[in-house]
Image: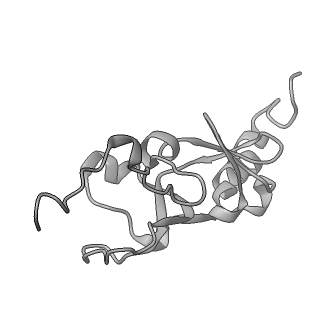
Amino acid sequence: MSAAKRRTIQPHEVKPAPRPAGLVLDAQLHLLDRQVLDVDGVPVTTVDDLELSGPVPDEPIPEGAAPPSITALLTGPVLGTRIFGGRPPSDRLIRIPWDVVASVDTVITVGVRSDSLDASWVERWLRNHVIGRIPGGSHDPG
């Protein structure tokens, strides 16, 4: 190509790359270890992991493929794996579908009551079988 036909592109002519549709989140900063509250503000659980859709792990991502998207928040017994390493079995993790998430802020709010989520069964069991049997534990002191 000759120098007469070559054209220099000026910085003001370069268009920015298109942003992906939807909310762009940094998983570690905005989601992991965040408290999840139900529609009434009742604590449900904390986020331990994420379930993503999109490219298969450890496979090359084809050019032009859609970015991964969150399909569920995962919670469960992960304390042992954080201390000793490894990963809990996937059948031990409880899924909170992403489509019930109402907002992401300093806490993650879901648009349903905690009783409808499997993630709050531990709190319900402790409330009914342990805390409720302690004298004075079955009523609000307020």
Residue under the image location 44 percent in, 74 percent down: 54
Residue 58 vs residue 103: left or right?
left
Residue 125 vs residue 56: left or right?
right
Q: Position of residue 21 (x, y in %)?
A: 58, 60
Q: Nearer the viewer, residue 120 or 35?
A: 35
Q: Nearer the viewer, residue 3 or 116?
A: 3
Q: Position of residue 113 (x, y in %)?
A: 81, 54
Q: Nearer the viewer, residue 38 or 64?
A: 64
Compared to 127, does 111 lie above or below? below
- In this view, which residue lies farthest toward the left? 2
Q: Nearer the viewer, residue 17 or 34?
A: 17
Residue 86 vs residue 32: left or right?
left
- In this view, which residue lies farthest toward the front? 4
Q: Quadrant of residue 116?
A: bottom right
Q: Quadrant of residue 83?
A: top left
Q: Looking at the image, what colour scheme do you see?
A: one colour
Residue under the image location 31 percent in, 73 percent down: 57
Q: Position of residue 81 (x, y in %)?
A: 33, 54
- In this view, which residue lies farthest toward the top? 142
Residue under the image location 48 percent in, 60 percent down: 50
Q: How many marks?
A: 0
Q: Position of residue 79 (x, y in %)?
A: 40, 48
Quadrant of the rendering where the N terminus is positioned: bottom left
Residue 87 vs residue 25: left or right?
left
Quadrant of the rendering where the C terminus is positioned: top right
